[in-house]
Structure formats: structure tokens, C-alpha cells
Image (cartoon, rainbow, N blue to C red):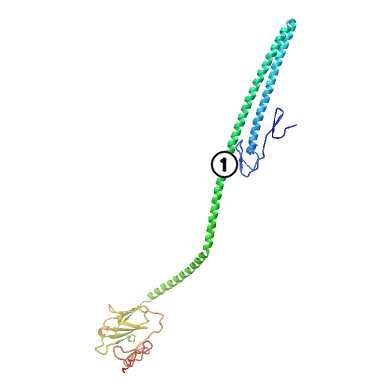
Amino acid sequence: MAPPQGTICKGGAAIEMSSTASQPSATPKRCYECGNNSLDQAFCGACGSPLALNEYIAKKVGVQLAETIRDRDVLEMDSSIKVFKQAWGWIRLIFGIAVALLVLAGGGVIWKASDFWAGVDNAKRSVVDTATKSVDEISAAREAGNASIAVAAADAVRQSQALRESASRAQTEISRDAAAVRADVEKSHVQLQAASKIQPEMEAMRKQLVQANSDIQAQQKVISSSEEFVKSVFSSHAEEIFNLGQPPKDRYAILPPLSKEVRNTVVLLLLQATPIQGTLQLQYHIYVQPPDSYFNIHNLVFFFWGDPAENLKQKALSVSYFPDKGDKEIIHSLSEHDGRMFADDQPLPKFGQADVDFKGNKWMPPAPTPAAKP
């Protein structure tokens, strides 16, 4: 009957070799025999050796033990054959000698018999010596096999220890990486929570930014309009020259003082347009007149000249201003009726004297009447 799988026969006895099936792993396995890496296999794809450590050790021990037993059996067989051959040779020699002696001399049979037994003893000693030598050789082979098994086992233990250390380091690195990933995920979660909390504020800021952009655009339009207005105003700067005493005389009037107590001559100047407030400037020849010496009502300028009236006719009187294009109430002419000056159809007061007949006009209300004393 054949011995079960995983056993080795020695002298008719079956020696059990324990083996456990290696569990497949999803990670690459390195062959202990040839060093080849195999994935998801129980045996090496290159040399066929088991990839599980315990099976590899069992296989190595079985191989070493089988080789040792086989060598021992061979040695025992060789020794037995040698002993048998040598003994058989001695027996044949002894028997030949005995027969020869018996043939030559029948009387020396007893003496030859003693020689026979001496030869038998010598053969026995030779057989014992040969057997002893064979046993020593078998013991030496067994010791060498045990040493090889011990070396293989130690190598397997070292590789197992290195594998465990590598697995431990890999587990440590995986744990560290997993902790880092968890920390990153937690940090991202916190950042997402913070972002969700500030989202209403960001929406409000976005609305404010949109409103600010609208305001800026409106301001830009206003600035653009203002720039256009300034350009329009400055491009419309006007300057009018009056040569008093020369036509057209309906554009000016000179009202000299009626008494010595009044020194100022009143000069009325009718402009083409109404000046913008603060832009009116009068200049006689090269002399700029003080701002408090004139004022205007629409496009009619009242100028109070402190020198003799005749001097006004010697040099030109220039008026510069920026016209107010929005003022549509323009005075068109000056005229005199019954000793009073009129702007179109509106009477003007007489400056420098009492004027009880002046009832006012649409630009200048009448002066209040002093209250009578009781």
C-alpha cells in the first residue's frame, strides 16, 4: 500500500510531514527558492516551490531527509553487498583451501579446520569493520543532512523575520498615511463648514460689489458728463468788446452822475448771453476792474465807473465770461424814454438819486417806503 501524500518512508515506517495550504493573498509573494515574485498563487510560477513559509520549510526538510535516507540506504546496500562479496570470496577461498587440504592430506583436516575457523573469524572481523565504517559514514551523512536542514530552517526563519519586519513597516506606513488622510479629510471638512458659514456674507459682499460697480459706473457717467460739461463750458468761453461812443449804441448806455456828490458813472452793457455766476470779468484797456464794481441781471451788466465818463471813450471795455446756456430769459435791447432807461419793456431805476417814480420791474422789486414817524 502506497504511503499517503506528504510522508517519507524510512525502513518500512511512514514519517508524517505536516503541511498547511497557504491562503492566497492579493499582495505579491516572493519565492524563497528562486526569488521570483508571483501574484495570487500558492506555488511559484517559475520553479514550482510553495510560496507559503511553512510549506517551503516542510518541503526543504522533506527533501533533505529523503536525500539523507536515500544516501543511507544506498550506503547500507553497498556495504552489505561489499561485505557479502568479501565474505563469499573468503568462504570460497576457505572452502577451496579446505578441499585442497582434504585432497592433499586427510590427516590434517582437524588442523585445517582450526585454520578455517580462524579465517571465519577474520572474515567476521572484516565484516564488522566494514559495517562499522558504513555506520560511521551513515552517521556523518545524517549529521551533514541535519546541518543542511538546520541551515535551511535558519534561513527560512530569517526570511520569515524579514518578511514580518517588512509587513510591520508597511503596516506602520499605511497607518501613518491613513492618519494623514483622515487629518486632511477632517481639515477639508472644517474648511467646508467655514465656507458654508461665510457663504451668506460672501453673497452680501457680492451684492455690495455689484452695487458698488453700478455706483462706480454711474459716477463714471457723471464724471464723463461733468468732463463734457467742463469741456463744453470752456470751449464756449466768450469775450465781448465794447467801444463806447461807437455803434451799435443799443448794446450799451452811459449814465453820468447828475450831481457832484455822486462820483460814479453807471455803464449798462448788454451781452449776447447770460454769464455763469462767478465767471464775469470786466477789463478797461489792460486794467482788470474789481468784482465789486459790477453786477449783472441776466445778460445786462451794471458797471460803476469811478473816473470821468469821457475816459471810457478813449479805450475799449472788454467783458469775458462763460455763457449760461440754460438761461432763456435774455434782454434784447436798451432804450431811453423820458429820461429813464428801459431793458426791453422793463424800466430801470435811476442810480445815484432819489427815484420815487420807479415802481420796480420783473427783476428788481421797488424799494420799501420808509415808515412815517409818529
Q: Residue furthest bottom?
A: 374
Report x, y in % for residue 146.
62, 29
Question: Closer to the camera, 172 or 314?
Answer: 172
What count of labels does the image hold?
1
Report x, y in % for residue 310.
25, 85
Q: State whether residue 108 is above or below residue 32.
A: above
Residue drawn at 63 percent across, 35 percent down: 57
Q: State whether residue 296 is above or below residue 76.
A: below
User: What kind of element bears circle 1?
Assistant: helix
Report x, y in % for residue 351.
30, 88
Residue 47 in view, yes or no: no
Residue drawn at 70 percent across, 17 percent down: 85
Residue drawn at 68 percent across, 23 percent down: 76
* On-image quarter of the C terminus: bottom left
Q: State whether residue 108 is above or below residue 134.
A: above
Q: Residue furthest left?
A: 260
Question: Closer to the camera, 233 or 76?
Answer: 76
Residue drawn at 57 percent across, 43 percent down: 168
Residue 28 in view, yes or no: yes
Question: Closer to the camera, 367 or 125?
Answer: 125
Mark 1 highlights which residue? 166
Q: State whether residue 7 is above or below residue 283.
A: above
Left or right: 153 in relation to 105: left
